[in-house]
Image: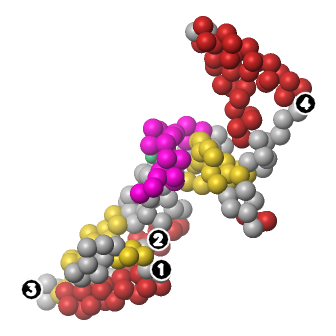
Amino acid sequence: MNVELSRRGFLKAAGVGVAGTTIGAFGFAELEAAHAAAIRPFKLANTMETRNTCPYCSVACGIIMYSKGDLRKGETAEILHIEGDADHPTNRGTLCPKGAALKDFVKAETRLKYPMIRKPGSDKFERVSWDQALDRIARLMKDDRDANFIAANAAGVPVNRWTTVGFLAASATTNETAYLTYKVVRSTGIVAFDNQARV
Ligand code: SF4
C-alpha cells in the first residue's frame, strides 16, 4: 500500500518542518518531535509495504518492510525502513532493540546471502548454488548416519538414535513449518536439535 499525502497534509507538514528547523535549533524538544513526525510521511511516501516476521528470536514479532521499486514492473526493490507491525497480535507494533535495528542487518556488508563452501585445503570460501549445497549436505548426512546410527542399546532395546549430527533451524517460520521441521528432523533419529520455537 502506498502512503499518500493530501494537499492540506502537505502544507501542514511543510509548515511544521520549517518552524521545527528554525526553532528546534534553540532546544525546543516538542517542536523537534513535531518536526520529526512531520517528516515521517515524506520518508514513506510511495513505498511498498511488505509484512514479514523478525528472524532473530522465537517471539517472532511482526514487522513491516517499506521498499521503493516495484518488482512487478521488473524494478529492483530497496528496503528504506522497517518497523513493528501495529496489527500483529504478538508485538502490536513494538520491537526490541535487535528488531528495531533490522535494516542494518538486511544491509550489512557481511550478511550471508547464498551458500558458500571452503574446500579441503583451501583458505577461502567460494559461492556455490543451492543445488550443490543441498546435495553435499544430504550426501554428508547420509554417510554420517549410515556410519553412526544406533538402532538399539546394549540391552537390545530399540533406541534409533543419531547422535553425531546436530540440527539448528530458524524461528522466523509459522507454527506449521516448525512442526514439520521437528517431525522431519526427529524422524532421522537426530537428538541434538533446536529450532528456537522448541516445539
Ligand atoms: S523484535 Fe526482538 S523480541 Fe521480537 S522477534 Fe525480533 S528479536 Fe525477538
Which mark sits nearer the N-terminus, 4 or 3? 4
Amino acid type indicated by mark 4:
Arg
Say which quarter of the image contains residue 21: top right
Q: Residue at x 40, y 66 (%)?
A: 169
Instruction: Identify the residue under disc 2.
Output: 114
Q: Are marks 2 and 1 in contact (CB under 8 Å)?
A: yes
Q: Is mark 3 within 8 Å of ligand 1?
A: no
Instruction: Kindly report the distance in space between the C-alpha atoms of the residues bearing marks 2 and 4.
Output: 45 Å
Q: Residue at x 67, y 10 (%)?
A: 23
Q: Are marks 4 and 1 in contact (CB under 8 Å)?
A: no
Amino acid type indicated by mark 3:
Ala
The vertical placement of 34 against 97, above or below, is above
Amino acid type indicated by mark 1:
Trp
Q: Please state if 199 lies on the left or on the right of 14 as rendered.
A: left
Q: Which mark is residue 154?
A: 3
Q: Secondary structure at mark 4?
A: helix
Q: Which mark is residue 130?
A: 1
Instruction: Identify the residue under disc 4.
Output: 7
Q: Secondary structure at mark 1?
A: helix
**x then y, percent, for residue 87:** 66, 43
The vertical placement of 37 against 190, above or below, is above
Labels 3, 2: front one = 2
Q: Residue at x 55, y 41 (%)?
A: 91
